[in-house]
Image: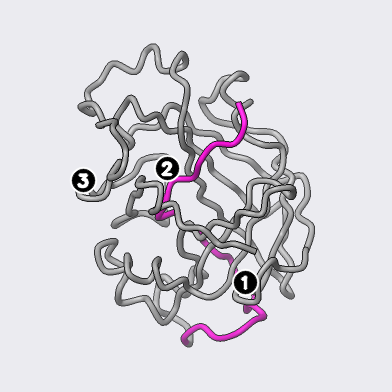
């Protein structure tokens, strides 16, 4: 099993203050954006009226997951996905869709560093993505929570989370079950973790609670 960091592809964003209250907007670290690509983001005032005609290159994922007895509760889980284009300011997504999963199945983790791994069927979407734009998202994905990856830990300080390092897990995902690439794309923590109102994190299993999976990296699109 190979675990990849999208930093190797050169497109990174850091969530700063307010990230756990994700609303489809990002604070972007200009020193990191599009670092290894030839594209440069346009000014954020770019007219977005025709963005439904722009092919996205990346997407972001934020999740809120209720965990009870190590299992996720689908009806109390939401995933918010946004399409991002190389041709425009990444702080202004093309569109955003929010999904309440129709199912979440517990799976064996693909790596020993991942504590819990769930196959998520996305279900119906709400938001401002049109039907053609929703076609860029897969019907199901796999997400997990595990050890905080060292490369994610290195981003905690510029993201404003360094004081929470002992309370945070790593967020992992795979875009399809026929893909060997597992991405470490952000941080995960319970609401109590972000309030520093619990003991530091340990090994599996996760304590009961509502967990925020917060993106630090954009993800490559694999459909469309």
Real-space Cα separation, disc 3 to disc 2, in angstroms? 20 Å
Between disc 3 and disc 2, the foreground one is: 3
Relative image position of residue 222 (x, y in whole percent): 59, 36
Element under label 2?
A: loop
Q: Quadrant of the C terminus?
A: top right
146 with respect to 35 (left or right)? right
Could you tell me which residue is drawn at 46 percent across and 60 percent down? 186
65 with respect to 171 (left or right)? right
Could you tell me which residue is drawn at 64 percent across and 53 percent down? 77
Query: Looking at the rendered structure, which numbered label has been put on residue 23?
Result: 2
Does residue 27 sit above or below 135 in this rendering?
Answer: below
Q: Report the colour scheme.
A: one colour
Q: In this rendered view, identify the residue nearer to me: 28 or 68.
A: 28
Q: Which residue is mark 1?
A: 114
Q: Which residue is mark 3?
A: 30
Residue 108 falls in which quadrant of the image? Answer: bottom right
Q: In this rendered view, identify the residue nearer to me: 168 or 181.
A: 181
């Amino acid at each position: 099993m190979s675990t990849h960091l999208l930093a190797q592809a050169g497109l990174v964003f850091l969530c700063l203050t307010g990230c756990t209250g994700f609303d489809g907007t990002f604070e972007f670290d200009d020193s990191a954006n599009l670092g290894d690509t030839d594209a440069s983001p346009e000014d954020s005032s770019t007219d977005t009226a025709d963005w439904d005609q722009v092919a996205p290159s990346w997407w972001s994922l934020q999740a809120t997951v209720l965990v009870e007895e190590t299992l996720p509760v689908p009806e109390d889980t939401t995933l918010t996905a946004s399409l991002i284009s190389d041709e425009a300011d990444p702080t202004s997504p093309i569109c955003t869709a929010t999904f309440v999963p129709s199912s979440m199945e517990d799976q064996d983790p693909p790596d020993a560093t991942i504590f819990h791994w769930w196959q998520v069927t996305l279900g119906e979407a709400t938001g401002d993505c049109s039907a053609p734009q929703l076609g860029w998202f897969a019907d199901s994905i796999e997400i997990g929570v595990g050890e905080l990856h060292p490369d994610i830990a290195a981003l905690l300080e510029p993201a404003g989370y360094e004081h929470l390092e002992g309370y945070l897990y790593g967020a992992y995902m795979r875009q399809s079950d026929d893909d060997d690439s597992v991405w470490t794309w952000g941080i995960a923590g319970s609401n109590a973790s972000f309030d520093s109102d619990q003991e530091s994190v340990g090994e599996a299993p996760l304590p009961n609670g509502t967990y925020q999976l917060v993106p630090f990296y954009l993800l490559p699109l694999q459909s469309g």
